[in-house]
Each structure stands twice: as C-alpha cells, then as structure tokens.
Image: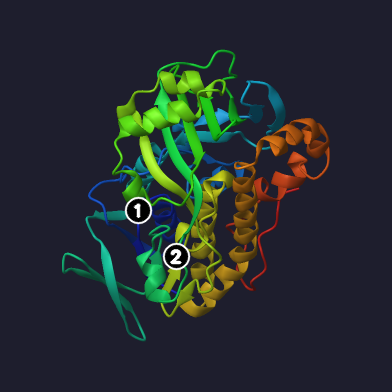
Amino acid sequence: MTAARTALVIGGGVAGPVTAMALRKAGIEATVYEAYASTADGVGVTLTIAPNGLDALRIVDADEVVKGIGQPLNRGWMHDGYGEKIGMFPGLEGLPSSRGLWRDELCRVLHERALAQGVNVVYGKRLIDVEETPDAITAKFADGTTATADVLVGCDGIRSTVRRLIDPNAPEADTTKLLNFGAAADIAVKGAEPDASYFVFGKRGFFGYWVQPDGRTAWFANLPWDRPVPSSEARKTSKDEWMDRLREMYSEDTPAREILANTSADQLVVLGSMESMPKVPRWSRGRMVLVGDSCHAPSSSSGQGASQAIESGIQLARCLRDLPDPQAAFAAYEALRRERVEKIIDRGAKTNSSKTMGTFAKAMMRVMMPVMMKTFLNPEKTLGPEQRYHIDWDAPVNTPAPATARA
C-alpha cells in the first residue's frame, strides 16, 4: 500500500517537474502548479548539474535532455586576478562530466520532459493557503481556484509559501554581503579550455566563467558589498549603472576586465545578495512536505543546489511509493536526506567565506594551494561523497537508512 495516490506539486522550477516525474514513476498522479505564467520566471543565470544530479535524472529519463543543453565541464581552474593559475579541481575518475547550463533552458527542458511523460503543469497558480482533512489536502490559489489530493509537495523555492504553512516560525533565507550578477560576453576568453570552468579570486571580488560552444563567455560575479541587498532593491538600480560599477570593481583583474568590457548592459541579470537556507527544523506537517530549495538551499557556491533538489524529489517519491502513510513516508524521506544536504550547506558557506578573503589571505592561498590540494582539499575527499552518491530506485524503503555512495 502506498502513502498516496495523488499529489499537488507546488512550484515549477527545477525540483517541481523532477518530483512530479518521480511520483508518476512511483504510480502517484502528480500535477505541478506554477505561480508564474510560463516555464521560467526570468530569475537566475548559469548553474551546474553535478554527476550525482545527472545520475538521479537518469531515473526519470531526463538525463539525456539535460546533457543536450549542458556544456561538459571536466575541471575547474582557480586563478588569481593576474591571470595566473592557483590550482585545479579535476573531474572525478569514472564519473560523467558536470554540465554547465542556463537556468531558463534547464527549466524548459524539464517541463517538456514532464509533459511528455504525462505530467500536467498548470501555470498562473500562486498558492496562498491550504485546508487539510484526515484524508486529503486542498490547495487554495490566489485566483480563487482550489485543487485537492492526498499530499502536497512544496517545491516553491527559497521563499517557500509551503514552508510558512508547515511552520509559521520557520527561518527565512540567509543573505550574504556578496552581490550576484551574471551574463554572457560577446567574446571567447583567449586560451580558455572549452571543457573547463574558471574561478578567479580577484583583487576586490570573485569572478567565474566558462567559454560556450557559440564562442561567447558565460560569467558570474560575486561582488562584496557593505550590506545584504534584496533582489528587489538591487533591480531598482539600472543595469547600465551596475555594469559601470562592475567594470570599475574588476578593472584590475584578468580576464574579468575584458569580459565585462564585451558584455552588453541589457544582457545583465541582477540577482541581489547571494542567498541560502539555514537548517530548517521542520520539513513536513500532516500531508505537506518540502523538497529542494524550500528546505535545503545551499549557497550557489556549492555547485550542488539543483542536483540536491533533484535527488530529494526522487527520494521522496520512493518513500511515498513504499510506506503506508504520508507521515511515515515523510519521516523516512527526511532521514534519507537531512544529514547529506546539511553537510553541503556547510561547505557552501565555507566557500562563500573564501570569496571575501583579504589580500594577504589570497597571497597565502596561492602559496599553499598545492599542499592543500593533496591534503584536506583533495578532490576525491572533498567532492567524492557528494558526486558519487547514487539512488537505487528499485530498492524498497523499509527503514530510514541513507542511500549509499558508489565505490
């Protein structure tokens, strides 16, 4: 006996369609309700799907479409602002390449794949409240309509309404003193390897990029600021003014200076301060449960946000498939996921700290990096437990034992 036959999936970003496909694979009819009027809401620039994310997508037959839009990234080079190499993180042996892609394209192909598998996606449905009975839960939307199912899954992101409905005292997102920007420049950085990403610890800010197959350079900037700035406030400043500030702040850094000089202001995406979720005490209540950024949004510095959301959606579907009631399924799901995602949240926070290092600390990092890469920053030791994680879809969920890492 399964814990549910029907599900309402709130949110149509990355987690929503993947969760719905996994639920459908588990024999549970799932409908996605997206607040926006279309697939992508226009927020977000580039992101990375790690090998573990691709492995999880294979379970719902969505890995190939994501590979089709993603650029293979086999290594990550760290540079200083002078263009000199500091160190390199290679891809892990035996694993597929990570994929660098644009968020709106990822959302589009996941929605298309979900629709092809028979998942219903309804747009323009902003959740405002729920009504729960012993046997069902009803979602109430801002347009006055309702929908009822056995369970409701909150895939509605870092500003989750479902999180607030589960726990009115739940924490809100943490914001850093790092402003986040991104775009694509109309040049290819000379000498850049086509299957590598680059992370530059510049004089006054952190800068990342990779060269796309079309000859343009995708980039993001994490700019230290004197205070957190919400995205709504950051967007009140014109893109032209932000571009002027970015060009000035990175004027002494190679190749950020050239990349920004060849970026049109109208292409700039202004995201405000980088955000992450603190550790959320409650992931579920009654017939409601959280998946993805609504309960475990690591900093984008972790490179794991989308991959963790994908994993969680699939693990939740397994638990609802195999356990007899929602509460038991939600408890098993949380036991499978919490420790793993919170370790990644912690790593992302540490990475953010490295982006605001002073001049002396950066100089020391350059000197010590070869030793660090052989010891506590050893790629296999640092990233192996994250990227070798594998979900055995066919294994029954009987007890809340975590999925194992692949050897």
**What colour-coding does the image apply?**
rainbow
Q: Which residue is situated farthest in the top direction here? A: 190
State which mark lies toward you, 1 or 2: 2
Reply above or below: 162 against 80: below
**Residue 402, horizontal then vertical, whole percent:** 66, 64
197 shown above or below 276: above
For the point 36% across and 86% down, the residue is: 134
Front-lying residue, 239 or 24:
239
**Residue 207: image location, x then y, percent:** 54, 32
Residue at 33% x, 32% y is 241
Answer whether labels 1 and 2 touch (C-beta < 8 Å): no
Q: Mark 1 points at which residue?
A: 12
- According to the picture, the residue beneath numbered tag 2 turns out to be 172
| Numbered disc 1: secondary structure | loop
Q: Is mark 2 on a helix, strand or loop?
A: loop
188 lies left or right of 377: left
Specify which label sits upstream in the sequence, 1 or 2: 1
Q: In this view, does 166 lie above or below 10?
A: below
Residue at the image position 69 percent from the left and 24 percent from the top: 85
Q: Position of residue 375 (x, y in %)?
A: 83, 42
- Out of 72 and 127, give the one closest to the viewer: 127
For this orientation, the residue located farthest to the left is 144
State whether residue 300 appears in this view: yes
- Give the amino acid at mark 1: Gly
